[in-house]
Amino acid sequence: MSTNAYLFLALFAAAAVGFALAPLAIAWLWARAFSPRKPGAVKNAIYECGLEAQPTGWVQFKSEYYLYGIIFLVFDVETIFLLPFAVACKGLPFGACLAMLIFILLLAEGLAWAWAKGILAWK
Amino acid sequence: MEMNDGEPAMNQELQNRLRQQGVVLTTVEELYNWGRKNSLWPLQFGLACCAIEMIAASMARFDMARFGAEVFRPSPRQADLMIVSGTVTKKMAPQVVRLFNQMPEPKYVIAMGACAICGGHFRDGYNVLRGIDLYLPVDVYIPGCPPRPEALLEGLITLQKKIARQRLKGPDRPPHLEAGTAGEFPVPQFGPHDLEGPQLGKARNT
């Protein structure tokens, strides 16, 4: 066979895409031919429980909680690492101790930064 | 495969004779209706005691799955059959009509039980709607109080026969295929004394 080996793959890829697109195309053509679109105020409503949505869905959502979630991670991670660190502290070489202290410093720095920005005060 | 107006696309006798020889002929319309009638997805909601019978019909003993209608959908967007199972109160009627409006076409309504048909025992109650057909186009009425699950299956089969008869073209094709007809039914609103809103020309209940 003198043809390119990748031609086979390309044919398969085209067939796969066609396999996925053909039903969509048929459904689209069928809808055009037989099933006219009939949008309406009730049909296009977002809420699907039979009731009218009230008030409007375009409300401001208070997203402050996520900051507390992120700051909680500081304590979460510290707890996980501090206990093994405290247990193994005496046997650790100087380099490992230094790395651990830098790690804690980074976490504490994040907390200090949040504190300085006034995020910890609930508004 | 051809679709002509009004007349059956194929001689039924010839079709049967060919089928005996192992040659199956069909039309697009027949295939389309066959697919639709065997995969009716009901909207998952129940109004009163008839709903208990509807639940029983969908369970293993009566097994509505035999007729392809066991996929109760929790969203009207995915449903094409509304089984009005039970007493429709006037408080509930606008919600029922709104849900029906949110279903995609083609869609069908089964009025299950005496209450959904005409108000039933509670017909004279101050808050009972005297039949869902005041606001929705009912395809199949199932009498009973409540109807047995077998009766619901019978109603479902009746609806399937109706779907199989529906034409894609011609003057007698269902109204949802016409671009001009409205897609939504008017949702009744609460007035000072009663539900207000245009009814589907049923004088018998007033």
Image (cartoon, coloured by chain):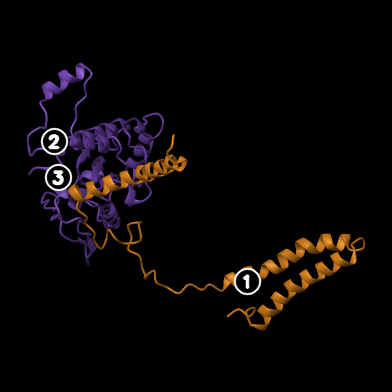
Chain colours: A orange, B purple
Q: Say whether residue A3 is left or right of residue A112.
A: left
Q: Which residue is mark 3?
A: B174
Report how many numbered discs are placed on residues in the image.
3
Marks 3 & 2, CB-CB < 8 Å contact: no
Helix, strand or loop at mark 1? helix
**Toward the viewer: A113 or B46?**
A113
The answer to whether residue B185 shows anywhere in this view is: yes
Q: Nearer the viewer, mark 3 or mark 2?
A: 2
Q: Which residue is mark 1?
A: A68
Image quadrant in which the C terminus of chain A is located: bottom right
**Could you tell me which chain the residue with mark 1 belongs to?**
A
**Could you tell me which chain the residue with mark 3 belongs to?**
B
Where residue B59 sits in the image (x, y, percent)? 40, 34
Helix, strand or loop at mark 2? loop
Q: Say whether residue A117 is left or right of residue A109.
A: left
Where residue B65 sits in the image (x, y, percent)? 36, 33
Which residue shows up at 67% across the image and 68% down it?
A72
Q: Residues within 10 Å of mark 1 (few under 14, many from 20)?
A: few
Amino acid type of the residue tagged 1 in the rendering: Tyr
Q: Residue furthest top?
A: B21
Residue B49, quarter of picture: top left
Q: CA distance from mark 1 to mark 2?
A: 67 Å
Q: Nearer the viewer, mark 1 or mark 2?
A: 2
Residue A4, quarter of picture: top left
Q: Residues within 10 Å of mark 3 (few under 14, many from 20)?
A: some
**Could you tell me which chain the residue with mark 2 belongs to?**
B
Residue B23, quarter of picture: top left
